[in-house]
Image: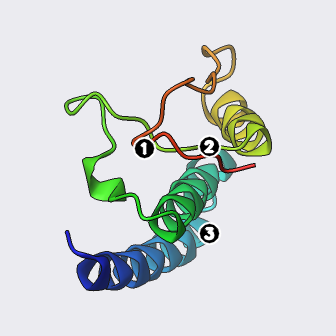
Amino acid sequence: MDPQQREKALSDMQKAADVFYRSAVMIGNHPFIEFTGLMNEYISACRLAHANGIDFTQCNKHNGMSLPLKPFMSDYINEKLECIFSGTKTLEIAQQSCEHSSLD
């Protein structure tokens, strides 16, 4: 995606997460609601990548590229995973990201 397409995708992704959250709250299953936290943290990571000129749509296992994450982001993701899937494996920050840029 080009930068304008990524901007639109970010906006649409946030709208989708907001709709999911409202629906999940109405269902009333707390672990299911926590998926919204995962979606929002993914969107935050995509925003961070986009701000650094990285095409976040190419960051996936199939392409061999990872989204850049700050340590607090992986901590938050692990917290959500633990709530949803108690006892699951935890996420570690990859040393490589889509681009070799410093995000600290």
Secondary structure beneath dot 3 equals helix
Which of the marked residues, 1 or 3, is nearer the chain's N terminus? 3
Residue bearing the label numbered 3: 25
* Few, some or many residues within 10 Å of mark 3 (<14, 14–19, 20+): few
Q: Residue at x 31, y 38 (%)?
A: 60
Residue under pointer 1: 99
Q: Amino acid at mark 1?
A: Glu
Judge left or right: residue 90 versus residue 56: right
Q: Nearer the viewer, mark 1 or mark 3?
A: 1
Residue type at tag 2: Leu
Residue 56 placed where, x, y %? Answer: 36, 56
Q: CA distance from mark 1 to mark 3?
A: 37 Å
**Does residue 40 lie above or below 29 as drawn?**
below
Q: Which residue is the site of mark 2?
A: 69
The residue located at (42%, 44%) in the rendering is 99
State the image quarter where residue 50 is shown.
bottom left
x, y percent for residue 79? 76, 36
Total labels drawn? 3
Estimate the x, y position of residue 104 in percent, counting from the top left.
Answer: 76, 49
Residue 78 appears left or right of 67: right
Amino acid type at circle 3 is: Val
Relative to 76, is 5 above or below? below
Q: Are marks 2 and 3 in contact (CB under 8 Å)?
A: no
